[in-house]
Amino acid sequence: MTVITRFPPSPTGMMHIGNARTALFNYLYARHMGGKFVIRIEDTDRARHSDEAVQVILDSLDWLGLDYDNTPESQFANKQRHIDVAHEMLAKGNAYKCYCTPEELQEMRDTMKEEGRIVAYNGKWRDKPESEAPADAPFVVRMKAPQDGHTVVSDEVQGDVKVENKQLDDMIILRSDGTPTYMLAVVVDDHDMGITHVMRGDDHLNNTFRQNVIYDLLGWDKPRYAHLPLIHGPSGGKLSKRHGSVSVEEFKNEGYLPETVNNYLLRLGWSHGDDEIISMQEAIKLFDFDGINKSAAKFDYAKLESLNAHYMVEADNDRLVDLVTPFIKQKFNIDLDEPKKKTLLAGMNGLKERAKTLVQLADEARFYIADITSYDEKAKKHLDQYLVFMLKGLKDKFKVLDNFNHDVIEAACRALAEEQAEGKLGKVMMPLRAALTGTDKSPSLFEVAEVLGKEEVIKRLDAAIEFIEK
C-alpha cells in the first residue's frame, strides 16, 4: 500500500499556524513512508471563497518547503460527483428525503431540550413512503445512521474512542437546493483521491464518527486516523491574534526563517527524546505517530525567536543577504547594489550573531550600507569636545596604514590607547564605534572597520569630528 496523506485547507484567508502544523505532519509522514502528499482546496463555501487566499496557501506551503505530489484539487469542481454519490445512496436505501420545514425542526429541537434529551433529528421521514411527501415541497437528503450499539474510532494518537450510535443522527448530505454538504464531499474526495491516512486537529474527531457512517453505507474502506492536539496560546486558551502573529504569512513578514517555523511546529506536538534542533531531513527520517503528543501544546513566541537566532547563525551568508534585502528596502528604502551587497556579505558573520530575525538583521546592517547622517543619544555621549582628539588621533593613525585589516586596525587602536588613554582601549573604541555606526553597539569594531574599508572609515571619522566641532 502506498501511503497518501492530504492537506485540505479552506481558502478564506491566510494560513493559520495550526493548519501549517497539520500540513507539516502530513508531509513528514508521507515522506517518511515513501508515499504521497497531496493538496485539496476545500472551496465549497463560495461566499467566502477567494482566489487570492488560495494563492496565499500555496505560497505558504512553498515558503515552508512542503512540496506536494499533485496539482491541487478543487472540492467545488467535484460537486457533481458528490451529488451522484448522494443519489446512489438514495437508490440503495442508505439515504432518504426529509421534508421537514425549518419550523418543524426548531420545534423538534425545543422539545428535546425541554425533555433533557440529546438534540438531534428524530428520524421523522426516515421510514415514510415517498407517497406521503407534500407535493412540490423542498427536501434535504439525509443518510441513515445506525440507531443501536456503538461505534469505535481507532485513532493513531487518541487510541480507541467510542461513541454511542444514538448520538449520531441522520446527517444531511444534500441541502434543499441540491448542493452537497461538506461532510459528504470530504468522504467522497478522500475516497476518490485514495487517501490512506487522515491527519487533522482533534476538533474534527466528532466529524470522523459521522463521516465513517458514510464510508460504511457506501462499502468503502476507511482511512486510518490521527487526530492532533490543538495549539493553544501562551495563556492556555485558543491561539488567536491577541497573543501575536498566528499565520505563516505574518511570521514570514516578521523575519523568521522557514526552517525555524518547521522545526518549531514539529516540536509543538511531536518529540524525539530531548532533541530540540531537528532539520527537515532528520524529521523525515524520524517522524511517526508514536512521537505525537496527546495533550495540547502552548505556543511560546520567545522560544520561537530563540530558535530562529540559532538558524540565523547556521544560515549561509549569501542566502541571508538575499533574504534581508527586501526588509532593508521596506524599512529604509535602500536598494542594495552589488557593492553594498558585497559589503553586507563581508560583515554578515558579525551581524547574524546579533540578530534573532531578518527584521533585526536589517536594523543591525544599516550602518554598513547607508551613510551615517545622525547619531542616537547613546552614541552622542561618546561624541563630545573632550573626545574629539581621540577621533583625530585615530584618523592620523589610519591614514598612514598600508594594510587595513583586522589585526593592523587593532594594533593602531591599542597604540592610541597607550598614548592617549592610559592603555584603556574602551576610551578609544567607544567614540570610534559611535563614529562608524551611529550607535553604541555593533559587531567587533575591528571587523566593522575592515569591512567598511579605509576610505569609508576616514570619511565617517571626518563626519563625526565635524559633528562635534559644530
Image (cartoon, grey):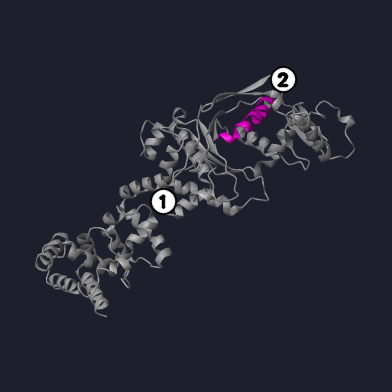
* Corner quadrant of residue 107: top right
Q: Is mark 2 on a helix, strand or loop?
A: loop
Question: What's the amino acid at mark 1?
Answer: Tyr
Q: Mark 1 points at which residue?
A: 256
* Corner quadrant of residue 377: bottom left
Q: Residues within 10 Å of mark 2 (few under 14, many from 20)?
A: few
Q: Name the residue under label 2.
A: 148
Residue 202 inside the magenta-drawn segment:
yes
Seen in the picture, residue 149 relative to 404 is either above or below; the reply is above
1 or 2: tag closer to the N-terminus: 2
Question: What's the amino acid at mark 2?
Answer: Asp
Q: What segment is highlighted magenta in the picture?
A: 201-217
Q: Main secondary structure of the magenta part?
A: helix
Residue 246 shows in the view:
no
* Corner quadrant of residue 343: bottom left
Q: Which residue lies furthest to the top in this view?
A: 149
- What residue appears at the point 37 percent right and 45 percent down from the top-left corner? 307
